[in-house]
């Protein structure tokens, strides 16, 4: 799958359906029929939409964990808690299950944001707050994560 790009504002209707932004739908066109998995984010109050192939690759990695270690079992259980298989319907809408809507505090206005190989779905106000909060230390974070040049792992 190609890497996803873009951040878009859209709305959720009264039934919990969101119209996928045209630009995202176009990027996902080759895999729309395969379906997706929607789950809670680990670090933020948002949802993560995994194309099925990405989800299956991740599950293969998790399946390699030793399930006779309690921390592995606990991690798997918590990581997959609330995960749902979802589809984009013929009209380009995605139904967000109620329990996931509650978890992410999703109201009417949302943000659909690419995160390399998955899509994040945010309540608009929470997204703006997360971006604003991250802006304070983003320069330091960018330097730490991406600016390493002495070990060959930075971008520049």
Image (cartoon, grey):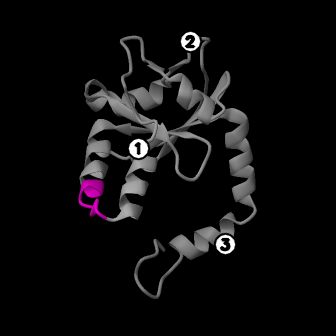
Q: Quick check: 150 above or below 122?
A: below
**Residue count near mark 2 (Cα–Cα under 10 Å), binned few <14, some 14–19, many ≥20:** few
State which mark lies toward you, 3 or 1: 1
Q: Which residue is nearer to you in this view: 38 or 1?
A: 38
Q: Which residue is mark 2?
A: 15
- Element at label 2: loop
List x then y, in percent, for residue 56: 26, 44
- Residue numbers of the magenta segment: 61-68
Does the segment drawn in magenta span residue 143?
no
Q: Which residue is nearer to you in this view: 15 or 140?
A: 15
Q: Which residue is mark 1?
A: 80
The residue at the point 37 percent across, 34 percent down is 37
List x then y, in percent, for residue 137: 71, 66
| Mark 2 or 3, nearer chain start | 2
Residue sitting at the far bottom: 150
Q: Quadrant of the N terminus?
A: top left
The residue at the point 29 percent across, 37 percent down is 52
The residue at the point 46 percent across, 24 percent down is 22
**Residue count near mark 1 (Cα–Cα under 10 Å), binned few <14, some 14–19, many ≥20:** few
Q: Which residue is mark 3?
A: 140
List x then y, in percent, for residue 19: 51, 19
| Mark 3 or 1, nearer chain start | 1
Q: How many marks?
A: 3
- Element at label 3: helix
| Mark 1 or 2, nearer chain start | 2
The Cα–Cα distance between marks 2 and 3, rounded to whole angstroms, is 41 Å
The residue at the point 50 percent across, 80 percent down is 148
Instruction: Let me know if residue 116 appears in the view.
Output: no
């Amino acid at each position: 799958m190609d890497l996803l790009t873009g951040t878009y504002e859209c709305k959720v209707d009264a039934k919990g359906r969101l119209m996928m932004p045209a630009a995202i739908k176009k990027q996902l066109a080759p895999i729309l029929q395969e379906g997706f998995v929607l789950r809670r984010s680990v670090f933020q109050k948002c949802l993560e939409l995994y194309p099925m192939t990405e989800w299956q690759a991740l599950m293969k990695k998790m399946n390699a964990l030793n399930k006779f270690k309690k921390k592995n079992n606990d991690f798997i259980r918590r990581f997959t808690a609330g995960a749902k298989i979802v589809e984009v319907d013929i009209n380009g809408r995605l139904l967000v299950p109620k329990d996931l809507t509650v978890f992410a505090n999703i109201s009417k206005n949302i943000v659909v944001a690419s995160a390399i190989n998955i899509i994040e779905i945010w309540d608009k106000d929470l997204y703006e707050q997360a971006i604003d909060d991250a802006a304070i230390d983003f320069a330091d974070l960018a330097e730490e994560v991406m600016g390493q040049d002495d070990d060959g792992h930075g971008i520049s």
